[in-house]
Image: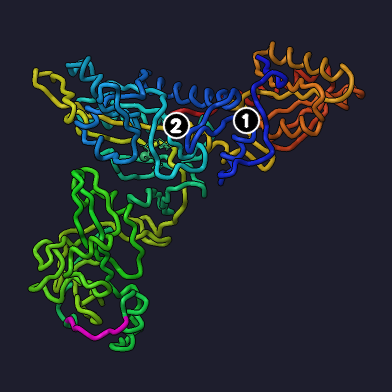
Amino acid sequence: MTLRLSKLFVRTLKEDPADAEIKSHKLLHRAGYIRRTSPGIFSWLPLGLKVLERVETIVREEMERAGSQEVHFPALLPAEPYQQSGRWEAFGEGIFRLKDRREHDYLLAPTHEEAFTMLVSDLYSSYKDLPLSLYQIQTKYRDEARPRAGLLRGREFIMKDAYSFDMDDASLDASYEAMRRAYINVFNRLGLPYVVVEATPGAMGGSGTHEFLYPSEVGEDTYVRSDGGYTANVEAVTTPLADPVPFDGLPEAEVLETPDARTIETLVESANEVSPRSDRPWTAADTLKNVVCALIHPDGEREVIVIGLPGDRAVDLDRAAGTGLLGDGEVDLEPATEDDLKKHPGLVPGYIGPGNSLDAPVLGAESSTGIRYFLDPRVSEGTQWVTGANEDRKHVFNLTAGRDFKADGYIEAAEIREGDPAPDGSGPLQLARGVEIGQIFKLGTRYAEALGLNVLDENGKSRVVTMGSYGIGVTRVLACLVEEFADDKGLLWPVHLAPADVHIVATGKGDEPLEAAEKLAAAVEAAGFRVLLDDRPKVSPGMKFGDAELLGVPNVLVAGRGLADGVVELRDRFTGESTNLPVDEAADAVVARLREQYAKQDAIELL
Ligand code: ATP
Ligand code: MG
């Protein structure tokens, strides 16, 4: 196939889009691959579609290899199944909702667990039908609060979503493993670097889950790794609870005046003045910071809670919401507002503490305020703290966890820092950023239960099916490929993803260059490869070379000035090397090179 630039629907641009922050957004726009329609919503132009198709083909082939069967669901779905699963509410403002002419509620699906569950429930009724794995490559809609970075976070985007249906946990484990391998194959074939990390279930519910992240500074996810091989999304890192320290011999709690100590910094200063330690000065790590938050329950109820954590740690509410310790279902955690605080006059801003003795707790379900109190696991039994005395201008010293105060539970609400120990003892953690390109979930029975997906087992007994759900952000992956491969000259695709295998540029006066280019194109095409031919008349060589670099085909063949000496020039965009080839050998040489490039691709070992 030969694409002719004289006819191709493409317009290369000099200017980056006004709102573009990252390379992939800028280059895909400037190279005429995509065009923004509205925030987070893009149109796909011919060259963009060609690359997208190549990415989709790899995803499709690996899904099929893993035994998943392709289906295609509508994007427009009735609200009822999502109401039944609880996600109509849980998604909040995150979904596009609409009504039909009869005033029935619909949504543009953000993901399809409910729809797949319903379909399988409609058609299947026996254990003999399982296990089953289905997938689709389909357009998803999410009304993201902050669509950003072009294709990385769109409001309309393409996802590959797969779903597995099994009779029991062991069978689900096998389905999950098959998908994990399929994902590894997909990303290896794409040539995109990735890390697999432990993740938190978030709004999906379920037990085990892993994310595939593309390591990159443009990512919104932070993950950790240790030298011993532990990897996790920072949201999923758990802090082991230390063994209790006996209370014997620990100093008694003591309330002291600490004027002007409403912040951790001023509290540390004040503590070192009013009660200096003999061994070392007080630091922020000795203080217990009590953070007031609002916990939003699935039914919308707003509960004020307090979280106690070491004063030297920042609060990370995403970690708190992700650990599932606050209860089942999706809960959201927000910083408390002025209104929340007004409703609880027992909380003295700047001087909040759990209470100065076990007998008179100020925080906790059983306390005078009734406000539930959660602790960071670092505040383990026997640790001693400087914290608020619930009186203006006063703090309590040596307040001892387990002896003087207790919590309603432990929660991960403190930031993870570089050098923190890995929970499995595999060494200190390093932090890095990444883009979530895929996630695999063991959903368990949550959706099957909510939507009545049961089948009869060997004994004729009705059993709830257990499910898995597996997503890859196809358009996001395409953007990551640009982040990975493109250079400062423009897009740059590995040949197996490129919109063409070779970009032939005809440039110079007279008919000769175009004739030579046409001949080369015909020969390369006859060998089964794809050509992008720059046959545009009256376009300057500089412009043509610039466009060739911007459009990103990795092999560029120039039929121009060299023809006078009987040669054409082959440029390798990846290495920057350029070779002169005799005109009549050029087509064979290019074909040989392409075969070599594709052979490397075929040699990738698959799981
Ligand atoms: P994120 O945390 O980035 O919002 P998510 O965890 O909500 O993503 P999933 O529900 O796990 O996303 O969806 C499966 C995959 O779809 C993700 O791993 C990601 O690659 C892709 N994806 C999700 N949201 C978007 C989006 N707004 N734009 C592009 N791709 C997306
Ligand atoms: Mg996810």
In which quadrant of this rendering is ligand 2 seen? top left
Label 1: how many Cα within 10 Å (few below 14, some 14–19, many 20+): many
In the displayed structure, would residue 534 be above or below residue 83? above
Q: Quarter holding the N terminus? A: top right
Judging by the rendered image, the residue that carries numbered circle 1 is 32
Residue shown at the point (61%, 32%) measured from the top left: 493
- Which stretch appears magenta? 253-260
Q: Nearer the viewer, residue 542 or 79?
A: 79
Q: Is residue 588 above or below residue 40?
A: above
Q: Is residue 272 a member of the stretch shown in magenta?
A: no
The secondary element bearing badge 2 is classed as strand
| Sequence-earlier tag: 2 or 1 | 1
For this rendering, which residue is in front, 338 or 232?
Answer: 338
Pinpoint residue 360: horizontal percent, then vertical percent: 9, 73
Q: Residues within 10 Å of mark 2 (few under 14, many from 20)?
A: many
Q: Amino acid at mark 1?
A: Gly
Q: Position of residue 462 (x, y in %)?
A: 10, 22
Q: Amino acid at mark 2?
A: Phe
Label 2 residue near ligand 1, CB within 8 Å: yes
Taking the image as shown, residue 555 lies to the left or right of residue 188, namely right
Mark 2 sits on what residue? 157
Residue 294, image x and y in percent? 24, 56
